[in-house]
Amino acid sequence: MVTLDPNAGLLVLINTFTVDPAKADELLAVLSRATEERMRHMPGFISASLHLSLDKRSVANYAQWRSKEDLEAMLKNPDAQPHMRAAAGLAISFQPLLYDLRESHLAAASHRAS
């Protein structure tokens, strides 16, 4: 379960891929496999959540890392690079951006699903 805690001090990477809808499921599979086989075993990795837009033209990877240094070490790791190249090869374009989580809000108790 992903925890969105502004006090945790985690680095957030949101990588948005533009993709041909016919390749969206393949891109999701590549990202999922990369996460299972490599990323989740790397120092500093916390979590990754994959999202598919309703029109299948965008895939977003919301990943949490302990620090920018951990993320940079992963990017330089030769074991991670084939997976990153495979994902980039399926995408029309991609835009990775780094964020600090500042706030997280929940629905009022009376509106939460039971």
Image (tube, helix red, strand yellow):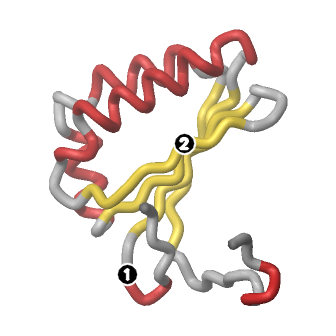
Q: Residue furthest top?
A: 22
Which secondary structure lies at badge 1? loop
Disc marking residue 50 = 2
Eyeballing the image, is 19 above or below 35? above
Placement of the N terminus among the 4 image quadrants:
bottom left
Q: Residues within 10 Å of mark 1 (few under 14, many from 20)?
A: few
Placement of the C terminus among the 4 image quadrants:
bottom right
Residue toward you, 13 or 104:
104
Which one is in front in this view, the residue at disc 1 or the one at disc 2?
A: 2
Q: CA distance from mark 1 to mark 2?
A: 21 Å
What residue sits 20% from the left and 50% below the top? 73
Count of numbered badges drawn on the protein = 2
Q: Position of residue 55 (x, y in %)?
A: 83, 29
Report the amino acid beneath label 2: Leu
Circles 1 and 2 in contact, beta carbons < 8 Å = no
- To which residue does mark 1 refer? 9
Left or right: where 81 falls relative to 92: left
Report the amino acid beneath label 1: Gly
Q: Residue furthest front?
A: 114
What residue sits 76% from the left and 26% below the top? 56
What residue sits 67% from the left and 84% below the top? 105
Task: Give whichever of discs 1 and 2 has the lower sequence position.
Answer: 1
Q: Position of residue 43 (x, y in %)?
A: 16, 55
Eyeballing the image, is 51 above or below 32? below
What residue sits 50% from the left and 15% below the top? 89
